[in-house]
Image (cartoon, rainbow, N blue to C red):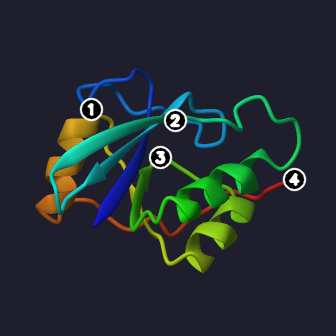
Amino acid sequence: MKIAMVILDKKLDSKLDQPFVRAYYFLIHDTEINKNKLIDNLAIKVTGGAGIKVAQTLVDKKIDILIVFRLGENPVKILEGGNIQLFRTVDETAQKNLEKFKNGELIKLEEFHLSY
């Protein structure tokens, strides 16, 4: 299983970043091989359609789970279309969120803000 999170710094003990679309980096944790991969958000400077572009990047990377603070409607459509399950983060590090997810302590993200 591949779990993605938006992070502030390129390290596992980084705090999670709040803006999904404008996050600098994504941490992808592969539970099958217990390895982490960091990727840059290439859509960070896109002026229009950035949410869709970021969401499609995660679908293309075959992510199974996204742990995030909040999402807009447009990215949600792409993510759910790619069968990515959405969970709400706790205000802690990437490592703590992974532990809480594995222990079943994170709740599904079911409220989304409107896209304009």
Q: What whole-number distance in Å separates the C-alpha atoms at marks 1 and 3?
A: 12 Å
Per the image, label 1 sits on a secondary structure element best described as: loop
Q: Residue at x 70, y 32 (%)?
A: 44
Could you tell which of marks 1 and 4 lies nearer the N-terminus? 1
Q: Residue 62 versus residue 48: which sits nearer the camera?
A: 62
Residue 49, image x and y in percent?
83, 50
Q: Residue at x 44, y 24 (%)?
A: 8
Q: What whole-number distance in Å separates the C-alpha atoms at marks 2 and 1?
A: 12 Å
Could you tell which of marks 4 and 3 lies nearer the N-terminus? 3
Q: Residue 28 versus residue 16: which sits nearer the camera?
A: 28
Residue 84, image x and y in percent?
47, 71
Residue at far front of view = 33
Is the residue under label 3 in contact with that under label 2 (CB below 8 Å)?
yes
Q: What whole-number distance in Å separates the C-alpha atoms at marks 1 and 4?
A: 30 Å
Per the image, label 4 sits on a secondary structure element best described as: loop
Could you tell which of marks 4 and 2 lies nearer the N-terminus? 2
Q: Which residue is mark 4?
A: 116
Q: What whole-number distance in Å separates the C-alpha atoms at marks 4 and 2?
A: 18 Å
Disc number at residue 69? 3
Q: Is 36 placed above or below 93 here? A: below
Residue 15, image x and y in percent?
34, 27
Q: Which residue is mark 1?
A: 93
Amino acid found under the numbered disc labelled 3: Phe
Q: Is 110 placed above or below 91 here? A: below
Specify few, some or many for label 2: CA neighbours under 10 Å numbering under 14, 14-19, or 20 or more.
some
Could you tell which of marks 2 and 3 lies nearer the N-terminus? 2
